[in-house]
Image (tube, coloured by chain):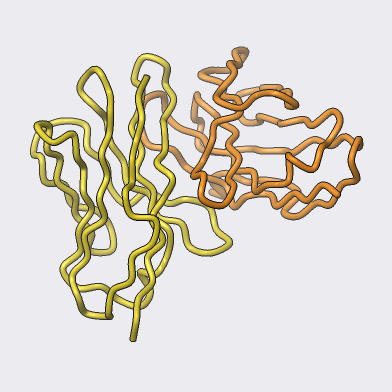
Chain colours: A orange, B yellow
Amino acid sequence: NAGVTQTPKFQVLKTGQSMTLQCAQDMNHNSMYWYRQDPGMGLRLIYYSASEGTTDKGEVPNGYNVSRLNKREFSLRLESAAPSQTSVYFCASSVQIYEQYFGPGTRLTVT
Amino acid sequence: AQSVTQPDIHITVSEGASLELRCNYSYGATPYLFWYVQSPGQGLQLLLKYFSGDTLVQGIKGFEAEFKRSQSSFNLRKPSVHWSDAAEYFCAVLNTNAGKSTFGDGTTLTVKP
């Protein structure tokens, strides 16, 4: 039982490049989330998916897109990376209204 | 809209001393509240949660938290801190209608030997 896994762990992009962050969970959770964490700003919700087939914007969705590929997988795409998107990205999952389980994070640097 | 305030950005305590981390929330209905801990370079891990019932809840690693509705607070406590407790701590409130949580900005705990 791996919990929530994220790939890659580290990534360096140049401004304007695109990439997709992958997230998968094996706990049969309905809900999945993408957050970014910046120093002194806690966790800010980018997008979430309350169930397979649905996605909703969070607090800071601009510059990102998501896909809930199936119940297990929830990917985050940066179409044209900007230095302001340098951050640590966390994926999480939960059973509806209960606590969230977090992945280990992806450290992204955009130069 | 819901919000969470953690007034202390950074706290330093000596090993063996007691600890209290403050959390104040704003939410229109009965809150579902959480404390998470994040060790350096790791994801967040749940310490404890409050949904209803007894207002004093016990969590892992010897932590407890008390829900006080009158003060809109959910403070985290530990009677005797260990060096391994050094980490960042996040309080969160769940919007049960939307199914998403709002996190505080976190409190970084340093433990002096």
Q: Position of residue B63 (x, y in %)?
A: 23, 59
Seen in the image, is B60 located left or right of residue A42? left
Quick check: A68 above or below A42?
A: above
Seen in the image, is A18 located left or right of residue A97? right
Residue farthest to the bottom? Answer: B113
Name the image quarter holding residue A91: top right
Seen in the image, is B90 located left or right of residue A93? left
Q: Position of residue B109 (x, y in %)?
A: 37, 65
Q: Residue at 86% x, 49% y: name it.
A: A111
Tally of numbered tags: 0
Seen in the image, is A13 located left or right of residue B43? right
Quick check: B61 above or below B1?
A: below
Camera sees residue B23? yes
Q: Position of residue A69 (x, y in %)?
A: 70, 23
Q: Residue at 42% x, 64% y: name it.
A: B87
Q: Position of residue A26 (x, y in %)?
A: 56, 38
Q: Residue at 75% x, 26% y: name it.
A: A63
Along the viewing direction, whichever of A38 and B64 lies nearer the viewer: A38
Camera sees residue A69? no
Along the viewing direction, whichever of A105 and B6 lies nearer the viewer: B6
Quick check: B34 above or below B100?
A: below
Q: Residue at 89% x, 40% y: name it.
A: A15
